[in-house]
Amino acid sequence: MSDNIPGFSTLAIHAGAAPDPSTGARATPIYQTTSFVFDDVDHAASLFGLQAFGNIYTRITNPTTAVLEERVAALEGGTAALATASGHSAQLLCFHTLMQPGDNIVAANKLYGGSINQLNHSFKSFGWGVKWADPADISSF
């Protein structure tokens, strides 16, 4: 007898989403909006003050993105996930959380050119350095 734990394929299609309660639609809609309506000024204050959960601006939360994040977390067996607009924004968020001015990143010198530029140039404004290593020579790391 099955213990009703959804498999990878089921999670890939359905995790993080529920049918729309008003229409019964199965597919997650794409919410193409920049902002959301507040019930009143107190509701807005509680959202901005992180006292209540809800949508404020698409760049912070969006129902479509939330389904993607929940689905990826389910597929990876994680608690949560964070979707970003690009690999560069993901790198920035990760490093900005971990790094302090004066810290160095050790990276392979065979990365995508945009990442090399980000590490070599853009991150200098944060006071971060980069030490390049050759992936063909593990001792260089």
Image (cartoon, rainbow, N blue to C red):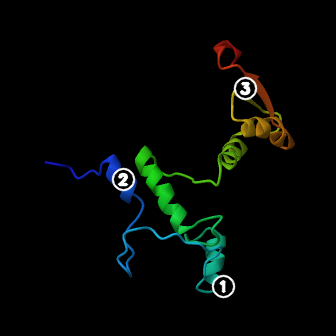
- The answer to whether 10 appears left or right of 46 in the picture is left
- Disc on res. 121: none
Q: Residue at x 69, y 40 (%)?
A: 98
- The answer to whether 66 appears left or right of 16 in the picture is right
Nearer the observer, 88 or 42: 88
- Residue 141 in percent (x, y) is at 68, 19
Say which label, 2 or 3, has the lower sequence index.
2
| Element on which disc 3 rests | loop
Q: How many marks?
A: 3
Q: Residue at x 65, y 20 (%)?
A: 135
In this rendering, the answer to whether 79 lies above or below 51 is above
Say which label, 3 or 1, has the lower sequence index.
1
Q: CA distance from mark 3 to mark 1?
A: 51 Å
- Disc on res. 41: 1
Q: Residue at x 57, y 53 (%)?
A: 82
- Disc on res. 11: 2
Disc 2 residue crowd, few under 14, some 14–19, many 20+, Cα 10 Å: some
- Residue 10 in percent (x, y) is at 32, 53
